[in-house]
Image (cartoon, helix red, strand yellow):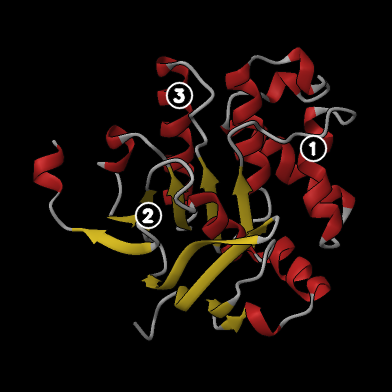
Amino acid sequence: MSDSLVRIDNLSKSFREGEAVRYIFHDLNAAIAPGEFVVLLGRSGSGKSTLLNLLSGIDQPDRGTVMIAGQNFTTLSERQRTLFRRRHIGFIFQFYNLIPTLTVLENLLLPLELIGTSDSVARQQAQALLDEVGLADRADSYPDRLSGGEQQRVAVARALIHRPRLLLADEPTGNLDAETGQQVLNLFTGLAQQYNMTTLMVTHSLEVARLADRILTIRDGQLFEDTDMENRR
């Protein structure tokens, strides 16, 4: 797919456990188009989070290539990957990963500060996005003063604040009750669509998967596309 935003070719990854080598997956191939919402399924330990780490440049593959917006991540230094990630990739974690010593507003300002956005523009953007996620009145609160759902809404806002081209989400509703999780999911998918972001979400939920444009599944170290959604309804 020549117009893909994300492309992985012959991607393989293993980890050493003592004297043994554990292979996570072999020769994965996939492409994701701009603006597409793709869900990644698979059993625990199948390599879903590992694949997100490779796509974000946090980790490097044993072999194969990761292309994001035409940039080959496997040829970049760690610093170059970090700089690229700050500008072009947003990441939402299951357990929020907010900085506890920063206020809600400061958590949103940090990504903008790292890419050199002026203070006045950054504050305007952060306040506007907090309003969109319904937390304008919690800007000066610290994360430990927020509920789980509120913390995840802050995490969503932080991932979107710099308008990334690629949004990665690792079980973003997995630590929330059903009702709160649905609220966060609606917020997350709505904003991603509003900003036309390419999204890859790891989940165990088939309910969430039904919202996706496509479903990819990691199984037995391989990546498969699920084309039989009707049987999942």
Q: x, y percentage for residue 127?
A: 72, 36
What residue appears at the point 82 percent right and 34 percent down from the top-left corner? 99
Please tell me the numbered disc located at residue 181.
Answer: 3
Query: Rounded to the nearest whole Å, what is the CA distance between mark 1 and mark 3?
Result: 21 Å
Q: x, y percentage for residue 162?
A: 68, 55
Which residue sits furthest left?
230
User: Of label 1 and label 3, which has the lower sequence position?
Assistant: 1
Query: Rounded to the nearest whole Å, what is the CA distance between mark 2 and mark 3?
Result: 18 Å
Residue type, mark 2 in image: Phe
Q: Residues within 10 Å of mark 3 (few under 14, many from 20)?
A: some
Residue type, mark 1 in image: Asn
Query: Rounded to the nearest whole Å, what is the CA distance between mark 1 and mark 2?
Result: 26 Å
Please tell me the numbered disc located at residue 107.
Answer: 1
What residue appears at the point 28 percent right and 54 percent down from the top-left corner? 213
Q: Residues within 10 Å of mark 1 (few under 14, many from 20)?
A: many
User: Of label 1 and label 2, which has the lower sequence position?
Assistant: 2
Q: Is residue 175 above or below residue 97?
A: above
Q: Quadrant of the C terminus?
A: top left
Q: Which residue is mark 2?
A: 37
